[in-house]
Amino acid sequence: MRKLGAETKTARYAMLIDLDRCNGCGACMVACAVENNVPPPQASATPRTGLNWLRVFRLKTGGRDAFIPVMCMQCEDETPCQSVCPQKAVEFDPVTGIVGQIPERCLGCRYCMAACPYQARVFNWRDPQWPAGMEKALNPRVSVRQRGTVEKCNFCHGRWQAALEKAAHDGEEGPVHYTPACAEACPAQAIRFGDLNDEEFAAACHEQGVFRLLDTLGTGPKVFYRTSRAEVREATRGFGEVRRG
Amino acid sequence: MIRTGILFLAGFSVAFSAGWWSMPRILYREEPQPVQFSHIAHVGEKGGMSCEDCHSFRVDGTFAGVPKLESCAGCHSAPLGETQAEKDFIARFVEPGIEPQWKIYARQPDNAWFPHSAHVQRGKVACEKCHGDIGKSDRLPVYRVHRFTGYPEDVMGKRTGPLGLKRAGGMRMDDCVACHRQNRLEHSCLDCHK
Ligand code: SF4
Ligand code: SF4
């Protein structure tokens, strides 16, 4: 953690997902759940009651299907979920640009879920249950949430904290570099994670064929998508209508 | 009138004292530590060790906390000195290779993330600032644990009382926040919560 001030070097972590590479295998979903102690769904879970921080949508475009991983977009402007939370349980961190969800403050009103245009938030209808023995394999860097709270992707902040701890130990200053679980697990290397202050990465996020979901809403998402296929870009314009595959 | 007043005051003070005395005993349970440990015997002139000999950092920056049995066994593979306690320690833990289950006074809730490296190494915060001068103690303090929450008293703290009884080693969120505010380091919840 660094002092905020003119001299502070802050980060603007962002993600660039190459849809031409994504083949919908779902490795990122599994990695995300394992990393963040998201419990396996109970037998009765529906798409509404199951917990997924990261979902891969299938987009039928007529030709080859496209797959779109969707997680919290880490909205930078007018962060919709944050602005409606009556509890201040959602918070935009000025040092990292990560939108934090603080389960221990969450009251469970789910206003944020209604406000999020990307439906990136999930609600714990029950206390998590782990198959016998699995609780021993939980990630100690991420606290398990209880029922009645909302949760969502936070760019694997447990990994960010680990990187921060190491940087403090090694005496390094400035923003830390780390890789979220989904980006690490992707066998097609479709997910790139970086800092928008890094010129090369920022340039890659502004190349031809890069777009953001529901860009016109002005929420300033920091998850970017890239595809060379115009029909995919065209079809995602009405993101709300993308069919769950 | 005055009689009533005196009677009321007497009754009040009896009830008040009874409550004052009994409440902590109702709320907190005392638990024994596996071994009576003396910091003084180990550090300083007597023992010649430094804090870091036992409380070390790992290469990834995480703090190892209370040392494992192998650190103790490094010196105590055979009894040092003649005391019965020393012999018991060897017989109970070192020889069978059983880790002593130390009770951690500063054990934090699961959702709190506290990097020792950021505070001790980067921030140069002295250990005593949070832990009190336990490093100079000859006996381990009594370990009290809250019967309902399971958290040690040093975390939940005597300071929850209305009079704010202060004791060294208070470890409540207020303490963290106060220090962070003072140093203009207060940014986001994710800085301390996981
Ligand atoms: S995508 Fe949804 S949950 Fe994430 S910051 Fe934006 S509004 Fe909030
Ligand atoms: S960044 Fe981490 S939390 Fe977010 S979707 Fe990827 S794996 Fe899940």
Image (cartoon, helix red, strand yellow):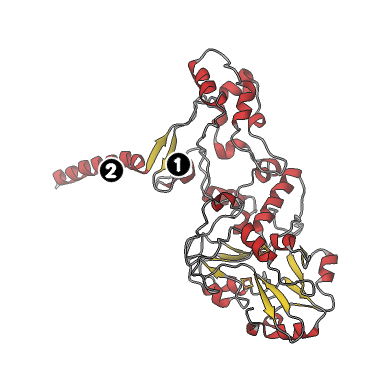
- Rounded to the nearest whole Å, what is the CA distance between mark 1 and mark 2? 22 Å
Give the amino acid at mark 1: Glu
In this view, B108 is above or below A90: above
Camera-side residue of A46 and A235: A46
Where residue B42 appears, x then y in whole percent?
60, 23
Point out the frontmost of discs 1 and 2. Answer: 1
Residue lying furthest top in this view?
B82
Q: Residue at coordinates 70% horizontally, 54% vertically from top-left?
A: A3
Check contact, mark 1 vs mark 2: CB within 8 A: no
- Badge 1: how crowded within 10 Å, few (<14), some, or many (20+)? many
Above or below, A185 relative to B89: below
Point out the image quarter for the C terminus of chain B.
Answer: bottom right
Q: Is residue A106 above or below residue A163?
A: below
Residue linked to disc 2: B16
Quadrant housing residue A17: bottom right
**Quarter-of-image position of residue A241:** bottom right
Residue A230: % across, % down = 80, 84
Q: Could you tell me if residue B111 is visible in this image?
A: no
Q: Say which residue label 1 marks.
A: B153
Chain name for mark 1: B
In front: B194, or B171?
B194
The percent coordinates of residue A115 (x first, y second) are 57, 77
x, y percentage for residue B43?
A: 62, 24
